[in-house]
Image: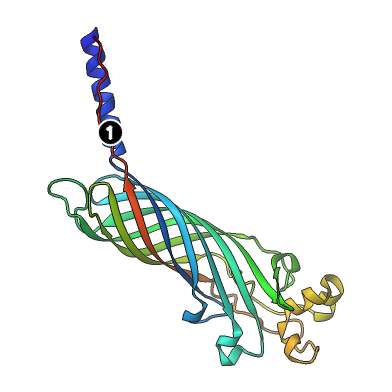
Amino acid sequence: MKFKSVIFTFYTLLSFSAFAQKVELGVHAGLSNYTGDVAQSMVLGETKFSGGIFARLNLNNTWALTAIGTQLRIGGSDENFSYNKSRNIKFRTDITELAGLVEFNYFKYGTGVNDKRFSPYVYWGLGAAFFNPQGMYNNQWYDLRQYETEGKAYSGVTVVMPMGIGLKWMPNKKMSLEGSVGFRKTYSDYLDDVSNSYVDPAKQLNERGIVGASLADPSYLLNEGAFLNKEGYQRGNPDFNDFYFVANISVTYRIFTRIKCARFY
């Protein structure tokens, strides 16, 4: 009976150790940017910071599953584009992203004798982004969703599809250094609070006050207090959703567990 208990304990510990060696915990930090209705092309001067944590399960030396959480900021201004300066929109948005990724290592990457300690990789996945756009009035930032600047409410959560490429390097069996660049396809056109058309400025002023009216039509601030954009005038383009981009440097720690068999005598 003791012999069977020893064998069972040994294989249990062996299985746990094998699983633990497949798990990595990591942190990442980097840069973020965006394209949308306030930036039809990426503006390097609007680059912000990002960071987060992740956990990875290496299924084998080719495939891995990763759960990742990222906090980032994006922003933009019509001042960056001469053809949009008169619109005068400026925004910033904090985003919390939670996602699950599938990773494919180009080389057989791992801790085994025949494995490579360096590999390019690609990733893709599915997640959710929780976002809160803000606009500026009188040098103060205001949450824009509550003002319904285009006359409609919208969700502060969107589905995202992360995709990207990167490099992994393992200097030893416990640690790896990684770099990646990627983008997020979103299913919202409101990361920047701009999508469709202007609302009636008189109605917005009456219901939301001068702050709400000027956030809906910031050109008011350039036109001596006059609202020039009438209801129905184009404010954004609803045909294209917003994208954001991330570039990260990561450090991971691979969990190793030494097997210590219990003594039964």
Q: Position of residue 173 (x, y in %)?
A: 23, 47
Seen from this angle, which residue lies furthest top? 1
Q: How is the image coloured?
A: rainbow
Quarter holding the N terminus is top left
Report the front residue among 205 and 229.
205
Q: Residue 154, located in which quarter of the rendered image?
A: bottom right
Quarter of the view holding residue 126: bottom left
- Which residue is disc 1 drawn over? 17
Q: Is residue 197 above or below residue 57?
A: below
**Which is more toward the observer, 136 or 78?**
136
Q: In the rendered view of the protein, which quadrant contains the C terminus?
A: top left
Q: Is residue 82 above or below residue 13?
A: below
Seen from the viewer's position, the closer of residues 199 and 216 is: 216
In the displayed structure image, the side of residue 126 where residue 265 appears, left or right: left
Q: Residues within 10 Å of mark 1 (few under 14, many from 20)?
A: some
- Residue at the image position 26 percent from the left and 35 percent from the top: 18
Residue 182 picture quarter: bottom left
Q: Residue at x 27, y 30 (%)?
A: 15
Q: Element under label 1? A: helix
Q: Which residue is farthest left?
A: 114
User: How many numbered marks appear?
Assistant: 1
Residue occupying the point 20% across, 47% down: 111
Identify residue type, mark 1.
Answer: Ser
Residue 238 visible in this rendered orientation of the protein: yes
* Residue 42 shows up from this direction: no
Q: Nearer the viewer, residue 40 or 76?
A: 76
Q: Is residue 208 left or right of residue 264?
A: right
250 left or right of 80 in image: left
In the picture, measured across the screen, residue 215 lies left or right of residue 24, that is right
Q: Position of residue 85 (x, y in %)?
A: 62, 89
Q: Residue at x 33, y 48 (%)?
A: 253
Residue 56 horizontal/vertical position (percent): 36, 48
